[in-house]
Image (tube, rainbow, N blue to C red):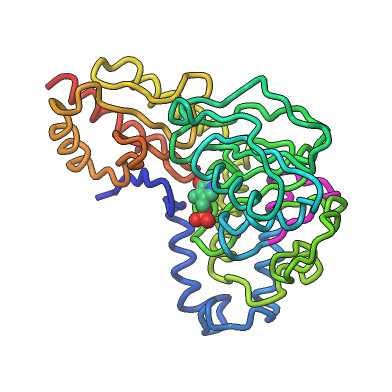
Amino acid sequence: MKIHNFSAGPCILPTQVFQEASEAMLNFDNLGLSIVEISHRSKNFVAVMDEAVALVKELLHVPNSHEVIFIQGGASLQFAMTAFNFLTETGKAQYLDTGVWAFKAFKEASGLGDAEIVASSKDKNYSYIPKGYNIDPHSDYFHCTSNNTIYGAQLKEFPLTEVPVICDMSSDIFSRPVDVAKFDLIYAGAQKNLGPAGATLVIVKKSALGKSGRYIPAMLDYNTHISKESMFNTPPVFSIYVSMLTLRWLKENGGVEAIHHKNEAKAALLYHEIDRNPLFEGTVVKEDRSSMNACFLLKDEAAHKDAFNALITEARINGLAGHRSVGGYRASMYNALGQESVQVLVDCMKKLENK
Ligand SMILES: *Cc1c(COP(=O)(O)O)cnc(C)c1O
């Protein structure tokens, strides 16, 4: 019986992708060899890398000014790497603090130079997105996190600024259209909407690099990875391969614009039930609710928790527990999660009400 996987990450990927990936684990391209035992410089793997980069460019309409690379170290390494490449010795960086990940990014930059928080939603446990703040036009860059995976708040709009914008899009990249030209750098760990952990996607405006004036270790320098076409050292081949398969699946299914419609429909279905059902409440202000991660609570946890947990276990729902800093429940509805899974969850909520 099917398991409905609402895990926040690592998370669900299309079944078709898991099938193809498992075949390639044993026999890739009919070579009689596994994808993970061939040279990353073989023409077979270079073709995978080239296709992955081409699909990112096509699906996100990446302009020619921007390069697409894959790096290791997760989004967490990007917290430091962005600062190394963009923060000058005498300049300062500005951060929007919308959650744990955003704050970790800020901390890495403040260890290297002058970083400040322009606005924060920490006062209300990150349950909204701050608005109406000012970005200093003389700062080196502005950093934000497009989707707050843990608390379930999402930037619906990005601030207009002349300053270079760097964005952590780990948990909503490829879920909705994005105007790449407005960003100097976008990064995303693979394991939320793209593939298994290991690869981190970076989209960077070439002309914005080389300005920090710092010594940058080779592995932390974006220009290293651009000039070596993501093969400066051995890349995480399996993660990149599976990411490429997921991007192929996305293209076959109409691309980012089509998946965006599906994601909006899934989110609307669940939030409607959260608002309608008297036993539940959402944790995030309505206008900032994430369409990827919906956080909600039982109004009377003591009275209903056991019954609800029994219902979701019986329905084979996986990964619904909220993050420990929010409690309650978090339904992550990434691209590969079908609307039928959201319906199963909604049915559980209705059953609880009717008990
Ligand atoms: C998961 C997540 C991270 C951390 O990613 P790693 O690849 O584990 O370092 C950072 N930012 C956001 C928004 C995330 O969702």
Examine the rendering and report whether any part of residue 102 can be seen: yes
| Relative image position of residue 305 (x, y in whole percent) | 17, 32
Q: Which image quarter: residue 138? A: top right
Q: Nearer the viewer, residue 318 or 84?
A: 84
**Is residue 183 shown above or below 136?**
below
Identified at 48% across, 36% down, the residue is 292
Q: How many marks?
A: 0
Q: Nearer the viewer, residue 63 or 82?
A: 82
| 198 left or right of 348 in image | right
| Relative image position of residue 68 (x, y in whole percent) | 73, 56
| 261 left or right of 297 in image | right
Q: Which image quarter: residue 351? A: top left
| 314 left or right of 126 in image | left
**Is residue 20 shown above or below 101?**
below
**Looking at the rendering, in which quadrant would you find the C terminus?**
top left
Would residue 147 be counted in the magenta stretch?
no
Would residue 65 be counted in the magenta stretch?
yes
Examine the rendering and report whether any part of residue 193 can be seen: no
| Relative image position of residue 330 (x, y in whole percent) | 36, 37
Q: Which image quarter: residue 277? A: top left
Q: Nearer the viewer, residue 143 or 204?
A: 143
**Is residue 217 shown above or below 213?**
below
| Relative image position of residue 257 (x, y in whole percent) | 63, 35
Identified at 74% across, 36% down, the residue is 179
> Magenta part of the protein: which range?
56-69
Identified at 48% across, 66% down, the residue is 21
Q: Nearer the viewer, residue 240 or 153?
A: 153
Identified at 76% across, 42% down, the residue is 141
